[in-house]
Amino acid sequence: MAKQEDLFKNVVSHAKEYGFIFPSSEVYDGLSAVYDYAQNGVELKKNIREYWWKSMVQMNENIVGLDAAILMHPTTWKASGHVDAFNDPLIDNKDSKKRYRADVLVEEYAEKINIKAQKEIEKAKARFGDAFNEEEFITTNARVVEYLSKYKEILSRLAKGMTDDLQDVKALIEELEIADPETGSKNWTDVKQFNLMFGTKLGASAESAMDLYLRPETAQGIFVNFLNVQKSGRMKVPFGIAQTGKAFRNEIVARQFIFRMREFEQMEMQFFVRPGEEMQWYHHWKETRLKWHLSLGLGKENYRFHDHEKLAHYANAAADIEFNFPFGFKELEGIHSRTDFDLKAHEQYSGRKLQYFDPELNENYVPYVVETSVGLDRMFLAVFATSLQEETLEDGSTRTVLKLPAVLAPTKAAVLPLVKKDGLPEISKKIIEDLKWDFNVAYDEKDAVGRRYRRQDALGTPFCITVDHQTLEDETVTIRHRDTMKQDRVKISELRGIIENEVSMKNWLMKM
């Protein structure tokens, strides 16, 4: 646990030191759970967004984009259920005065038990090797059976308490003797619901202003525009509408850096299908979205599916793609079969039909919806934290390297003149002028070339191009590869092709 905490501190520190993420309003001591993306962070975030958009919209003929307004008619949120049901179960510790999400306290307790079971399984794997039968071991090893049984029982009781009676959740916390993570106190208040939407007003004066909400999700903008998009684009079911954009939630327990923020960005796609066909599309998108994540090469072992036992009021199936963050496996993306709840609710509250005429079936119906929703900020954190590594080199020295997937790296190449004279800076800048039409490139002439290499390693730059005196003779340069530190002598004219081969979205998405 201490090692994980140290890793997470390094992630936060590195993000600030190298211009990826700053605390918002830091000159005024910051604003809790709000962050600014700095010069390198905004590039990495943009590249993640574009990688998602390319795979979801550009590569699918039946998916189109949308950019709905953040402010929506207030009845939208009544219809969607957010006014009445968008709540977190909160519990206060009477001694520390700290506030926590009650369900998260229980889930984190249960996850520790699950981790114990997984450690037993991993030990057995190492001991028995190829002869290991994992399924048999899980069902016959007394310790593992006990751990997993306890884990499932806790989550089942939590789900029941969240649905039936929040006091049962408090009773479960007391029974498990869950303590305040910071102080160890077990003196808890009752569990209460807290609505997460930010309120605002629209109007010229306080007397005439209309009460509005900052949207807590981007999905509703898609639903209310369903018919507009379908008719103007002549879309045929099945088809999807994709959107990226800001959402706002008044998280009381916002923590873990950019994992849980009050202002965040979502990348969502709502896929409209015939009633009765939703489950086949649900499984299709589960598989497709996992392939997208795996295409980035962050390690298959860092992903797992978590199928929901407790379903939202609008869903008939739901699963999370969880990622192994520095603080454990947590939700990265949700895939939900939302049935026809949303469109029917907006029909009811608006008084307008939101139906599709299917020419093949010769009938009107309200489509069912399969949703994929990934947090862009969480995706940023997953990529950044996994890529940040400390390496011990052959000579015993160490280097900090940010091994970002090259397709996402903020800067694709840095051009370094060996010295600041003899015409080398001029050649370097000429190379930059040529490459910058296709790639984000940087010029770096300060310090010894070895220190510049280390600086670019820490920034995640895949290539360093060094211009030296031999360049004057034969128009060749040294290109250094970030991950292997291998150096090749190549023609200046070959640089574009080498970089393109490593950073092309096409080449990365072809791995799906």
Image: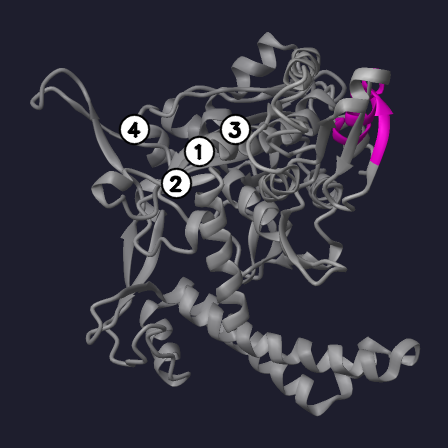
**Residue on which the image places disc 2:** 22
**Disc 3 to disc 1, how far (Cα)?**
19 Å
Decide which of tag 3 and tag 4 comes sooner along the chain: 4
Q: Are marks 1 and 2 in contact (CB under 8 Å)?
A: yes
Which residue lies at the image location 50% right of the left edge and 38% below the top edge? 341
Label placed on residue 308: none
24 relative position to 119: left or right: left
Above or below: residue 3 compared with residue 424? below
Q: Residues within 10 Å of mark 4 (few under 14, many from 20)?
A: some
**Disc 2 to disc 3, how far (Cα)?**
22 Å
Of marks 3 and 4, the one in the foreground: 3
49 relative position to 287: left or right: left
Above or below: residue 130 compared with residue 197? below
**Disc 1 to disc 4, how far (Cα)?**
33 Å
Decide which of tag 3 and tag 1 comes sooner along the chain: 1
Decide which of tag 1 and tag 4 comes sooner along the chain: 1
The amino acid type, in three-letter code, at marker 3 is Thr
The amino acid type, in three-letter code, at marker 4 is Pro
The amino acid type, in three-letter code, at marker 1 is Ala
**Residue on which the image places disc 4:** 74
Q: Are marks 2 and 3 in contact (CB under 8 Å)?
A: no
Which residue lies at the image location 33% right of the left edge and 72% below the top edge? 182
Res. 204 in view: yes
Of marks 1 and 4, the one in the foreground: 1
Which residue lies at the image location 67% right of the left edge and 23% below the top edge? 57
Label placed on residue 244: 3
Q: Nearer the viewer, residue 7 or 141?
A: 7
Q: Secondary structure at mark 2?
A: strand
Label placed on residue 38: 1
